[in-house]
Amino acid sequence: MSCGHGALPSRAPRPAAVAEAERCLLRGGGAVLLRLEPDDELTVIDLEGRQRCELAVFA
């Protein structure tokens, strides 16, 4: 995965069970483009609370 403009790859420690997970930490006003494959999952977590997020999906 390649993080987009304003994004930083997360270096947070990961449990072995999710070692294959990819993480991308975005700064405010940042953007990221991801290519998901069938059966991939995407989780969006708002660490600071009350932040707006726009998610667009193209097939």
Image (cartoon, rainbow, N blue to C red):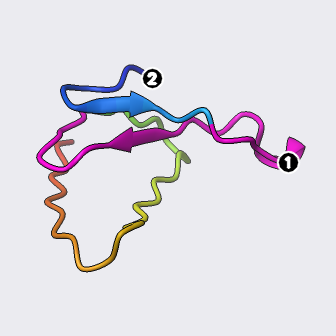
Q: CA distance from mark 2 to mark 1?
A: 19 Å
Work out which quarter of the rendered image holds the C terminus and state it: top left
Give SS at disc 2. loop
Please check the rendered image and state whether residue 29 is part of the magenta-colored stretch, yes or no: yes
Disc 2 crowd, CA 10 A, few/some/many (<14, 14-19, 20+): few
Q: Amino acid at mark 1?
A: Ala
Q: Is residue 46 above or below residue 6?
A: below
In this rendering, would 24 be left or right of 26? right
In this rendering, would 50 be left or right of 49? left
In this rendering, would 45 be left or right of 16? left
Residue ID at (18%, 26%): 5
Give SS at disc 1. helix
Q: Amino acid at mark 2?
A: Met
User: For residue 1, what is the image quadrant?
Assistant: top left
In front of the other: 49 or 18: 49
Q: Which residue is mark 1?
A: 17
Q: Which residue is mark 2?
A: 1
Q: Looking at this view, name the residue that lies furthest to the top.
A: 2
The magenta region covers: 12-32
Nearest to N terminus: mark 2 or mark 1: 2
